[in-house]
Amino acid sequence: MRIESYIEDGWKKQGSLYEALGLNRKEPGILSVVGAGGKTTVIARLMKEHEKRGIPVVVSTTTHIQQIKASYFLDKPSGQRMRQILKDKGKVWMGYPCGNGKIKAFTEQEQKKLLDEAIAMGACVLIEADGAKGRPCKAPADYEPVLHPDTVLVLSVYGLQAIGAAIEDSCLRVDKVEEILGKSGQDILTTHDIAILAASRKGGRKGVASSMDYQVILNQADDERLKEAAAGIGEELFRQGIRRVHRTTGLSEETGQLRVSGQTRLGGQEGTEE
């Protein structure tokens, strides 16, 4: 695993994603994860890192996320059961099973009650707030993202393996990507394009309120070409005022396995999202 954060004069290696995001300087709260190319991997990594620090953590969704087969899965909105699982396991993954190995959010009222209780218990809440259908890059639909109003940090994830591929092959919501970039679906996605998408209020920053911190994760920096691509994106975003940009590789290492709907998936192998 390697995590680096862009600082004004270059990239600095970080010991953990938790530290890179500055969570060691914040009270636990709600983190919403959007984008493509590794959202569930990021959530699984953060869940593990909170667990190592003895910080309770709750994983939920405002849309859909993977269902897991684990003793810490909560499939009904029971505050008593959630508290017991947090006490016994230190972590909860919750939502209504809805088929195809996915879960959907509890109702707004149910979820609010549970999340309020979780935060009162000192838990960090990780919410997957949109879908990507397995694509490494995307722009949000009109109804996306669904950000919890009490979100304190929005993490926008991009899979660097999208760079160099045609927009229509690498991106979800091709029409929205075309609109933001002023390109066609046959055009090749570039590092500059990723920076534009990440900085755009119609792209990665859509719906992000002034009260919410916004950070970008450039995932899958698996070779020198992609590391250099991430470097260019980080520098461009820094110039546009986005002060926390991270490039990551190997985030699924040591996070354990997510047992999904009768099969085993590693955290880094994100399934189809709705």
Image (cartoon, rainbow, N blue to C red):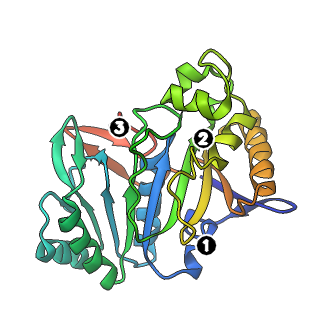
Q: Residue at x 30, y 74 (%)?
A: 90
Q: Locate residue 14: give its quadrant.
A: bottom right
Question: Which residue is denoted by mark 3 in the rendering?
Answer: 273
Task: Report helix, strand or loop for mark 3.
Answer: loop
| Image spot of residue 193 (x, y percent) | 70, 35
Q: Nearer the viewer, residue 255 or 86?
A: 86
Which circle marks residue 22 in the picture? 1
Q: Are marks 3 and 1 in contact (CB under 8 Å)?
A: no
Q: Which comes before the other along the chain, label 3 or label 2?
A: 2
Is 190 rendered above or below residue 158?
A: above
Circle 1 SS class = loop
Q: CA distance from mark 3 to mark 1?
A: 28 Å
Query: What's the distance in space between the residues labelled 3 and 2, CA to CA?
Result: 18 Å
- Residue in view at x 59 percent, y 23 percent: 167
What amino acid type is highlighted by mark number 2?
A: Gln
- Is residue 226 visible to us here? yes
Above-or-below relation of 264 to 175 = below
In front of the other: 7 or 149: 149
| Residue 191: % across, % down | 73, 35
Which callout, 2 or 1, points to the residue nearer the camera?
1
Q: Amino acid at mark 1?
A: Gly
Q: Earlier in the sequence, mark 3 or mark 1?
A: 1
Q: Toward which corner of the image does residue 94 lie, by quadrant?
A: bottom left
The residue lying toward the viewer, choosing from 220 and 116, is 116
Label 2's element? loop
Q: Which residue is mark 2?
A: 220
Q: Are marks 3 and 2 in contact (CB under 8 Å)?
A: no
Check disc 3 and give the amino acid type.
Glu
Residue at 46%, 77% (x, y): give it. 53
Q: Is residue 53 left or right of residue 71?
A: right
